Structure formats: C-alpha cells, structure tokens
Image: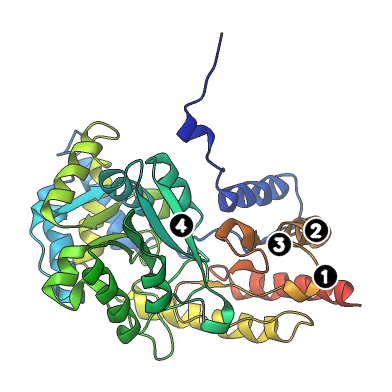
Amino acid sequence: MNYRIAKNAASLSPSLTLAIDAKAKQLKAEGQDVVGFGAGEPDFDTPQHIKDAAVQALAEGFTKYTPSSGTLELRQAVAEKFQKDNGLTYSPSQIVISCGGKHSCFNAIMATCQEGDEVLIPAPYWVSYPEMVKLAGATPVVLPTTDATGFKLTPEQLAEAITPKTRLLILNSPSNPTGAVYTPEELKAIGDVCVEKGILIMSDEIYEKLVYDDARHVSVASFSEAHYRHTIIVHGLAKAYAMTGWRIGFMAAPEPIAKAVGAIQSHSTSNPTSFAQKGAVAALLGPQDHLPRWIEEFNKRRTYALERLNAMPGISCVPAKGAFYLFPNIGKLGLSSTEFCSRLLEEEKVAAVPGVAFGADDCIRISYATSMANLAKGLDRMEQFVRRLAR
C-alpha cells in the first residue's frame, strides 16, 4: 500500500511548544520534579460564573448542533465586546466563532491565501503561523526582528518586503513569544503601509487584555475605515479567561471573508461545542473582576523573572510589555536554542521552548504562567545551568 502524504501536509513541522509540554508532562508522570516554562496556558482556573453557565447549559440539554459559525447569542456578545473594548462596529454576520484562537487563524489563512501568494510574518513568530500558510499552499516570507528593536517590525522593513505576490501580513500584538506590544503610533504606521499597498492584515489579538506598565492595546482595525476594511481580527478566550481547554475562538472580518470562513468551517469542524459557547457568553458579558487580580499577579512574576534572567551570566532579556512570556537571548552561551533547552531539561528538569521554533535560534521562550514558587525554583535551576556553561 502506498501511504502517500499530501505535499502540503508532508511539509509541516510538528508544534515544538506542544512537544516540549508533552515531554515535561511525561517526565512528571514518571515521578520527576519538572518545572514547566513551556506551555502558554494560565495556571488560574476558569472563573466560576463561566463554568456555571456551561453546567447550566448541559443541565438544560443545550447539547445539539448550533449554527456552524456559532450561536447568534455569542456572535452578538463578541460584537458587543468589540464595540466596548475597541470602538469597532461589527454585525453578527461578520463574526465567526471557532474551535479556539488557533482555529480562527487557520480559517482566516485558508480563506484568503492560495498557491502563488506570499504571507509576511515578522519573526519571532508564533510557531503555527508559517505552517498554516504552507497548508494553504502559499509561501511564508519571514521578516526578522531582534531584541535591539524590541522585536518589532518597522514600516520601512514592511514596505521593502512587499511584492506583487504579497497577500497578507500577520501581526501579533501583544506578542507570543516575545511579549512585545506595538504602540498605537507604530501600529498605525504599519497599517498605513498595508492600506496603501492593498495588503490584508491578520491581527492576532488574543493577548489583548494582558498588558503591563505603560502599554495599551489598540486594534489596527480602529484607525480608519480603510484600516477596518483591510483587517481580519482573530481572537479567543483561552488566555484572558483561562479557557484553553474550552476551545472557543472568534474572528471579526469584512463580510465576504467571514462568509468564506463560515463555509470552510461548515465543511470541516461544523460548530464549536454548544455548551462551551454558553460559557463564552458568560465570559464576555459577565463580571470581569478576575482580570485586575490576574494581571497584577502576572506582572509580579514578569518583574521577578526579568530581573533574575538579566542577572544570569551571558543572558539578556528585553522587558516584555504584554502576554505572559519572556524571550531571553542566550546567544553568548555558545549553544543553539535546541541544545540549550534539551540540556536544561535533561540536567536541571526545567522545560523551556527553543527560540528556533519561533524563528530566533539565539533566544528561548519562558512562560511565566506558573506560580511564583515554580518560577523561583525553575529560575534557580536555570541559573545553576547557565553558570556552569559560562565557566
């Protein structure tokens, strides 16, 4: 039997973040004391009122198919969120509820990109963006940035990279993996280039609520009617509501794109889980009082970890302004990011993600979405490891 794998599927690299997390969990299951800095998953529980809404939906028998693009109730709640938080007006027909933020990204790329198209991806990037572009048959074009510029793309760099084949720019602010947050002025300048050149923007805003210091989130779609027409916003509830396992994401887009995404979803996953959508309504419209507490705690961890990392020999780390990641530079230590993380896990039982997975082999990603006790223990071990390397 010839088990030929389709070319687009065969070209994919498995998610290294999920692989690291799985390896750490395996070692823990074997009884080893592993500190996990790998997964992008809040360690807080889903707020109780959200769980209660899903439980009530189950009790009331809300367990059947819903419209494939999500319930009208949830799409209206998402529209209300965009109006309230971002000053953006979307009709429910412009919104598609998906099986997670990752699914929204995948749908947006599949609906807009095809063979012969180029998609611009600033690096460091989230691991799945280039692979999704490959699955659509398009070509990912990576635009490198460094810690010297705060891991931010400049309008000049963007303009220089655009060719007649350029279809889409993927923008992620606040960023996974760097925690970088574009200022409103920086975002507008990038959006202006895309508007002028007729390039679509896929704006991944899933970390919108998690910003620190003087940073504030602004959607690139909010600057003008033209920016709005050029932007597809992808979003989800996983990060700000600790709903990673619920698999509810959403997208807001110009109506033709939303319609195409709805069609794709109707032939792939059908609808997102019915009772999870009831929980999502409660998340968006219910109390938000967990957020200040979570952000305060994340900020304590961020400040502590940043100070610890910058005190380690051979390591430098720019201050992240959003999300719950730090992206320290390990380039002076003489190891590739893969070798560094492999040895760190083997020798000190600390799981971090190699920067090569994000297009930056001189860095690693640390998630501080874990307790202060775990953070302290893991950074103590990492410091021992780094001091051995630096000797």
Q: Residues within 10 Å of mark 2 (few under 14, many from 20)?
A: some
Expressed as whole percent of the image width and height from the top left, the position of residue 263 reads 18, 37
Which of discs 1 and 4 lies nearer the camera? The answer is 4
Expressed as whole percent of the image width and height from the top left, the position of residue 273 reads 27, 41
Label 4 vs 3, first from the N-terminus? 4
In the picture of the structure, the residue carrying the numbered disc 3 is 337
Q: Residues within 10 Å of mark 3 (few under 14, many from 20)?
A: many
Expressed as whole percent of the image width and height from the top left, the position of residue 294 reads 42, 76
- Check disc 4 and give the amino acid type: Val
Which of discs 4 and 3 lies nearer the camera? The answer is 4
Q: Label 2's element?
A: helix
Q: Label 1's element?
A: helix
- Check disc 2 and give the amino acid type: Arg
**Residue at 53% across / 38% down in the picture?**
11
In 3D space, how far apart are the residues under numbered discs 4 and 3 (Cα atoms)? Answer: 22 Å
Of the pair 19 and 304, the residue shown nearer to us: 19
- Check disc 1 and give the amino acid type: Phe
In 3D space, how far apart are the residues under numbered discs 3 and 2 (Cα atoms)? Answer: 10 Å
Can you see residue 63? no
In the picture of the structure, the residue carrying the numbered disc 1 is 385
In 3D space, how far apart are the residues under numbered discs 1 and 3 (Cα atoms)? Answer: 14 Å
Can you see residue 42? yes
In the picture of the structure, the residue carrying the numbered disc 4 is 141
Of the pair 238 and 276, the residue shown nearer to us: 238
Residue 243 lies in quadrant = bottom left
In the picture of the structure, the residue carrying the numbered disc 2 is 343
Residue 92 lies in quadrant = bottom left
